[in-house]
């Protein structure tokens, strides 16, 4: 398997623009997570899906953020409108399970480095 | 809720042994995981403890004591390539936080020649 795939790897945009980040999880993984990483706040869980269904989005900072998973092999995280404080690295991760053991290991994609000017 | 505390930085020389502690406050979790992240890279899984005790994986070992709310990652025979950030993480088991995987702030390990 190619691992978790994210695109784009880098994104530079201007404040107010819409940003869409994409993720393809590892085939067979039932859980997909979106994280944001900054120096100030570390690695934060934004939202996670189980079998394509959003389970918990309490980490989504504002209504400007939305995420979808239309099928088992694709998810998007959208920011509209984007603001400079959204600048961060956004990681997508997938796992087989949440209930302990090796199955809860999270496999991270390479991340999208977002800069909002 | 849960929180995980780890030192912000540790510096050591090649060949040395480094222990990164992780203390936590959590209402319950399945296991304690450790992840490594190099600058510019993504977190990658290192080790997992479901039960109390020591787990050894090559030069890296991880320990968990649920009664002490404490765990650690032990890096032995340090190499320059071990310079990275190391995160402890838990997957909560409580109903109201199930699935909310949480990471500590990370410990930057700097290995010097």
Image: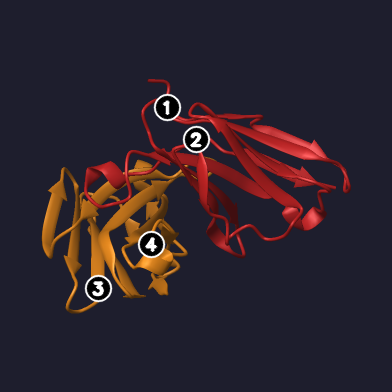
Residue B32 left/right relative to A32: left
Q: Which residue is mark 1?
A: A3
State which chain disc 2 sits on.
Answer: A
For disc 3, the neighbor class at 10 Å (few under 14, some 14 to 19, many from 20) is some
State which chain disc 4 sits on.
Answer: B
Q: Which chain is tinted orange? A: B
With respect to residue B45, does A63 lie above or below? below
Both labels 3 and 2 in a single chain: no
Q: Which mark is residue B70?
A: 3
**Cα distance between the residues tagged 3 and 4:** 21 Å
**Cα distance between the residues tagged 2 and 4:** 28 Å
Whether label 3 touches label 2, CB < 8 Å: no
Both labels 1 and 4 in a single chain: no
Secondary structure beneath disc 3? strand
State which chain disc 1 sits on.
Answer: A
Q: Which residue is mark 4?
A: B11
Viewer-nearest of discs 2 and 4: 2
Secondary structure beneath disc 4? strand
Q: Which mark is residue A109?
A: 2
Whether label 2 touches label 4, CB < 8 Å: no
Residue B34 left/right relative to A78: left
Both labels 3 and 4 in a single chain: yes
Residue A105 point in image, percent of width and height: 32, 44
Whether label 3 touches label 4, CB < 8 Å: no
What colour denotes chain A? red
Q: Quadrant of the N terminus of chain B?
A: bottom left
Secondary structure beneath disc 1? loop
Residue A92 seen: yes
Whether label 2 touches label 1, CB < 8 Å: yes
């Amino acid at each position: 398997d190619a691992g978790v795939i994210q695109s784009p790897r880098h994104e530079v945009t201007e404040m107010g623009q819409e940003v869409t980040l994409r993720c393809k999880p590892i085939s067979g993984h039932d859980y997909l997570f979106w994280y944001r990483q900054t120096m100030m706040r570390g690695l934060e869980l934004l939202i996670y899906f189980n079998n394509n269904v959003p389970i918990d989005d309490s980490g989504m900072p504002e209504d400007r953020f939305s995420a979808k998973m239309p099928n088992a092999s694709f998810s998007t995280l959208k920011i509209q409108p984007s603001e400079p404080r959204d600048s961060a690295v956004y990681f997508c991760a997938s796992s087989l399970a949440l209930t302990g053991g090796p199955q809860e290991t999270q496999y991270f994609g390479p991340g999208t480095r977002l800069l909002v000017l | 809720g849960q929180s995980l505390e780890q030192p912000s930085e540790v510096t050591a020389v090649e060949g040395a042994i480094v222990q990164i502690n992780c203390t936590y406050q959590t209402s319950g979790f399945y296991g304690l995981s450790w992840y490594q992240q190099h600058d510019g890279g993504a977190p990658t899984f290192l080790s997992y403890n479901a039960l109390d005790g020591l787990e050894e994986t090559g030069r890296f070992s991880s320990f968990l004591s649920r009664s002490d709310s404490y765990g650690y990652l032990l890096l032995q025979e340090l190499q320059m390539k071990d310079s990275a950030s190391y995160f402890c993480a838990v997957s909560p088991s409580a109903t109201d936080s199930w699935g909310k995987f949480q990471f500590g702030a990370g410990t930057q390990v700097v290995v010097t020649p």
